[in-house]
């Protein structure tokens, strides 16, 4: 039985994402914070953690990225893309709300509503959307931005529904396990996540990273930088590349990156949670083209 830690308490979007993996009820373990969920994997207290990584509107969840990069011993083996809709829950009426609590990412995605409808309310950042609903129940804040189900479970009235700045946002969660776990088998629609430390004293260092991928026909699906924390001007680049470490093209690209970067950390290869097919490799850059070229070279060298 693999137990999965998630950002609790029950009623968070993280719990909804965990349920998509269908663990038995006692196999999903709520934690107070995202670092606690990841540390529970490092300590061996649970077999895996499912943590939010990025949102289609607000971008990355820095605490997840920084914890994955800052600490050793973790690997990504899966993802869940979850549509999220936000409600305002609290004791009404709406005009009497003075304080609104939620997870920072949820508050950020409802900025338009909060500015328009509650311009003089103060926002209070808490560890999760369900913790915000609990704070309403405890009487420490007037309202929470949370999933409708979190409010209903606690018997808190909904003051407004679908309050996100866009109706169609999705959050991407990643399934994280101990680093000595081998990657799952390739499916043909996979993603490989890397942390790349460029050679800072080289002009064009980032361009050479992108070139190593492009010339091998590896499609970059996400790139962002985070400060390394060493000093101003030092960044690590987080790349998501379409493909699996077992694919020939990806292997070639990794060999290239290893040669031009100060450090390359492999964070994992795992199936994409999408119905969209992968972008096809350009002509001449498929794995078959690569194998044909390898055969040709072997022939030149007098091999079989
Ligand atoms: O607080 C939650 O419910 C979470 O799971 C984190 C989160 C917050 C906002 C959008 C998606 C996930």
Image (cartoon, rainbow, N blue to C red):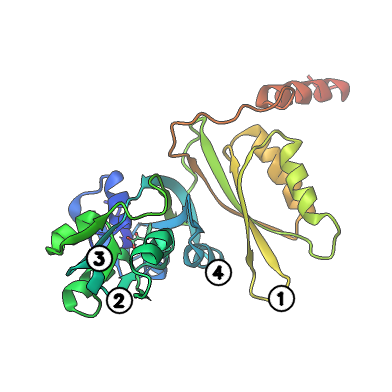
In the image, 283: left or right of 5?
A: right
Q: Is mark 3 within 8 Å of ligand 1?
A: no
- In what element is the residue under mark 3? loop
Up-down relation of residue 114 to residue 212 (above or below): below
Q: Which residue is mark 3?
A: 9
Q: Residue at x 23, y 61 (%)?
A: 10
Q: Are marks 1 and 4 in contact (CB under 8 Å)?
A: no
Task: Choose mark 1 or mark 4, whichever is in front.
Answer: 1
N-terminal-most mark, 2 or 1: 2
Q: Are marks 2 and 3 in contact (CB under 8 Å)?
A: no
N-terminal-most mark, 4 or 3: 3
Q: Which residue is mark 4?
A: 70
Label placed on residue 99: 2
N-terminal-most mark, 2 or 3: 3
Residue 244 visible here: yes
User: In the image, residue 273 lies at what x, y percent?
Assistant: 43, 39
In the image, 187: left or right of 155?
A: right
- The foreground one among 62 and 288 is 62
N-terminal-most mark, 1 or 4: 4
Up-down relation of residue 241 to residue 51 (above or below): above
Marks 3/1: CA distance?
37 Å
Q: Residue at x 64, y 70 (%)?
A: 228
Marks 4/3: CA distance?
25 Å
Marks 2/3: CA distance?
21 Å
Label placed on residue 232: 1
Q: Residue at x 77, y 26 (%)?
A: 294
């Amino acid at each position: 039985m693999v137990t999965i830690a998630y950002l609790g308490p029950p009623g968070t979007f993280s719990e909804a994402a965990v349920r998509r993996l269908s663990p038995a009820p006692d196999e999903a373990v709520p934690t107070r914070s995202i670092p606690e969920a990841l540390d529970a994997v490092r300590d061996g207290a649970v077999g895996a953690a499912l943590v939010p990584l990025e949102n289609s509107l607000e971008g990355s969840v820095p605490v997840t990225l920084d914890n994955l990069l800052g600490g050793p011993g973790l690997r990504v083996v899966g993802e869940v893309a979850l549509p999220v809709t936000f409600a305002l829950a609290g004791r009404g009426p709406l005009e009497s709300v003075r304080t609104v609590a939620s997870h920072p990412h949820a508050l950020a995605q409802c900025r338009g509503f909060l500015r328009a409808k509650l311009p003089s309310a103060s926002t209070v950042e808490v560890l999760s959307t369900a913790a915000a609903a609990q704070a309403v129940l405890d009487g420490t804040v007037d309202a929470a931005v949370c999933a409708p189900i979190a409010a209903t479970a606690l018997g808190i009235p909904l003051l407004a529904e679908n309050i996100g700045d866009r109706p169609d946002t999705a959050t991407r969660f990643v399934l994280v396990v101990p680093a000595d776990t081998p990657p799952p088998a390739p499916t043909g629609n996979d993603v490989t996540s890397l942390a790349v430390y460029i050679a800072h004293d080289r002009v064009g260092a980032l361009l050479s990273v992108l070139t190593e991928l492009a010339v091998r026909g590896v499609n970059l699906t996400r790139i962002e930088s985070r400060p390394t924390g060493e000093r101003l001007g030092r960044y690590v680049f987080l790349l998501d590349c379409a493909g699996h470490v077992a694919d020939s093209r990806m292997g070639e690209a990794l060999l290239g990156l290893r040669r031009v970067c100060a450090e390359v950390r492999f964070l994992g290869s795992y199936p994409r949670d999408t119905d969209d097919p992968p972008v096809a490799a350009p002509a001449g850059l498929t794995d078959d083209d690569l194998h044909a070229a390898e055969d040709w070279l072997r022939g030149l060298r007098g091999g079989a």
